[in-house]
Image (cartoon, coloured by chain):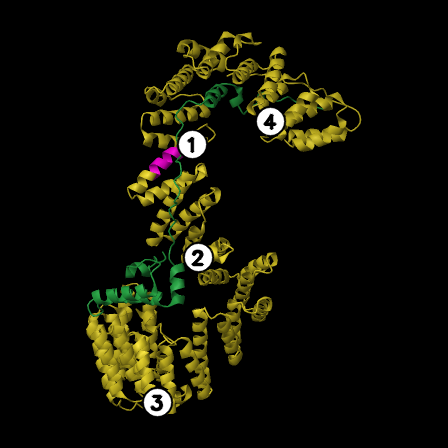
Chain colours: A green, B yellow
Amino acid sequence: MPEPLQDPYATLGLPRDATAAQIKQGYFALVRAHPPEREPELFKRIRAAYERLRDPEQRIEADLRLLQPWPASPRKRRPPAAELALHPADVIAVARALSDLERSDWREQFGKVTL
Amino acid sequence: MPKGRLPPSQFAPSSGASLDTRQRGLRAFQAGRFDEAITLWTPLAADARVQAALAEAYFRRGLATRDARALADLRAAVGLAPAEQRYRYQLGMRLHRQGELAEATACYREVVAGGGPRGAALLLALATLEASPRADLAALPGSTPDIRAVLAPAQALLTAKPLPPTAELVAALRRVCGLNPPEAQAVASLWSGLAQVAASDSAAATTLEELRRLPNLRLTVIGRAYRGVAAAQAGDQATALRLWQDVAKRNPEIVAVAANLAAATHARLAALRESGATAEAAELALQSHALGALNPAFSELRVQALDGGAQLAATSGDWTRAALLWESARQLVGETAGLGSPRPLLHNLALAYEALEQWEPAAESWRAMLRTRPRKQAADTGEGLSPAHWAWVRKRVVECYKLAGRPDEAVTIFRQMVKAEPNDLELRLQLADALLANEQLQAAQNEVQRILQIDGSYAEAQLRNAAMLSTQGYLAAAEGQLRQAVAQHPEREDLRRHLARMLQSHADSYMDQRNIATALKVLEEAQQLDPESPQIPLDLARISFDYGHDERARAFLERATALADNDPTIMAGVFRCWLIEEQVDEARAVVAGMEAGRTPSADTYLALGAVAILETTPPPKLPGPFAALMQPEPPPPPAVDTVWTKLGRELLDKAIAQRPDDAKFVATVAMNLMAPRPDLALPYAEQSAKLAPDQPQALIVRALALALNDRIREAKDQLGRAAALARRLKLPLIVQEAESMRREISSPLFRVLYQSRAFMRATGMDDDLLDDLF
């Protein structure tokens, strides 16, 4: 199974529209909180996330490698309502189902052809 | 049920001309090839016997098909044999099913009057009732008390009257419809249940639940649909949803089932999403895919549920499931007006297909995403995708088609698009990129030139043109093109950066040509264009050292350090400059400066330590393979420790101090030293093997260090143990690696080959060695 995506914004705790300055600031704050000598693996992830966002070209790739959420609609729409009444067409459908209209095999009505 | 049997028609044998045609028609008729029989018999229809046979052929074909031609065939049969009431009866039923009640009624009347199938009287009453629920059925020809009793519940419900007594109905159903007692009783209960639903009587759910023996599937399905309605009336939404889902699978034509199912599914979906049951909500939305775009709110909720489930699946690595869910969402957005652009779904789908390495659908998804781009750039800014983002998407279209083995497809697509919109320069640029990917370099260049002929200041084309000129070695022309672009678009910082990067890269070429003055000139221009780049002062420092301008070089290095923000790559570059200049104190100062900011990572220490040792150790003498075969290679001279070796070891020890228990990292340190200083590599290899005695890879690294220190027998033992261990761990590639090394390790060529390979690795040409092992 392919690897799941790593979101560098999530790693750095930043919104996707963070500015370059915010990215830098967020990175240094995290490095201070998780210095490499104490948490080398976490630091590696933080550093990798920062590397993906600090360069504008790499950031474009990072942006487009991230899943996009389906945006919530600002419009309030009317949900579908159930029809809980007896529909005349269904009454007729029951009556029809009791008649020949429901049959499909009419071989008994086939005539014999001899020329 | 009425049987409606008529005595079969008899056709006397025919004689005369066209006998062959008639017989051929007969053979086709008997084989069920009614089209052919009709074609053969139609010219002979003047013959009464052929006419009767032709009518039968039309009749059979009319019954065999469900399309519009069936009605025409039955009409033709009736026209050719008006006395055959079975033809007219079937025509009446076909018209009845299609809702042509007046014409159907007329047919039934004639059938009843002509003594045709006995079901005609019931159908005449039914068609009359459908046309007018309050009609007097007793006044119709052929009407009997039983027929009226069979239709009485329907008439009562259509006219909002109470149902007649059940006993009379059950008896009539047995006589008119041929039902057995349990079936007749079940039909009576169905009518009662429907009447209770009409009256919103809570007893309806129980009445309809007890239906077991209904005589046909349609009645069963209608019964289940209204059991769902009764459950919903009683507030049991879960039962209603389950029943309607079942009905929708069997017969979605029942009135209101689709709408009711949509309403129940919507409510359930909303509840699931509210409770955070993302995967369950996605599955329900997927199951309701066939309901289509009934209601925009319902579609929107399903898209949200599908997307949520897909995101969850993707996050856990299940891209197959994610792609399935996004495909469903994408179709739904396409079918429902006003839900918005499918762009996020197409984007995610493309990523999912790329993760699955399904390159063609990935290319199609990126391509579909491109089509969602608004034509005016201004409209785009709100959605967060810049022209650079779109350029990246275009590159993926081309790349994915290339990976799918169809780079030509991207060219074809963009050519078609350009043909339709020849003045769309962006499209032409996409075509140029596709041509480049398809290795049609000249065609790509021609396309870029065409763009520049249309608009000489089109920046993206100028960039492409400059890149192509640079690749072809026309460095000055490439620089000129980008300088022009920068001058024409002073607001575009990215162009300035591009030019700066190109000048940096050209500076390397000028240096290779020993054209140092030009290299210096272009680097100074690059620095003006991108004054924040730390790489440019670093390059300038190297040139200044070459010129002997040590003070200038020092100033550049200080600037590079200030801009580097402790970037390990740049700092390693600064460190290397001092190393080349043999200024060990300055190199130590670089390390101290880095440490003053924050402790460098283990990888940074490793990079610096390895550079210090690699760059200052004389390269191993690499004899030709024949020389090695002719006479044994003398042992290498003993390694000499220098101040740089000392610094390198200090840095490597600092690296290991950060990750003392990481066997792979320690092995990496050993591998970095293996070629230049196997004597220094050995202790690290020993340490790695001690840390991971159960990892055959660590044993192989130790064996290699032993071999390069001329301890061949120990190396062979170690490789034997590594192979056995790998076999136990079911690592066939490692077994192969260990055994192959064990065979080769005592060969005089081994050291030569290894050192050659290690040299490549030191120059970055073989970084995968350890990854192959670990």
User: Residue B181: x percent and y percent?
Assistant: 41, 14
Q: Give the image quarter of residue A108.
A: top right
Mark 1 — residue?
Answer: B259
Look at the picture and state if B506 lies above or below B156. below
A75, B53: nearer the viewer: A75
Residue position for label 2 = B381
Lower position in the chain sequence, tag 1 or tag 4:
4
Above or below residue A105? Residue B573 is below
- Chain that bears disc 4: B
Which element type, helix, strand or loop, lies under badge 1? helix
- Tag of residue B632: 3
Task: Check disc 2 and give the amino acid type.
Answer: Thr
Q: Note whether residue B686 is visible.
A: no
Magenta residue span:
B260-269
Mark whose residue sits in front, 2 or 1 = 2
Q: Based on the picture, tell me whether residue B639 belongs to the magenta stretch.
A: no
Mark 3 or mark 4: which comes first in sequence? 4
Are dots 3 and 1 on a single chain?
Answer: yes
3 and 4 marks in contact (CB < 8 Å)? no
Q: Main secondary structure of the magenta part?
A: helix
Outermost residue, right side: B17
Q: Chain of mark 2?
A: B
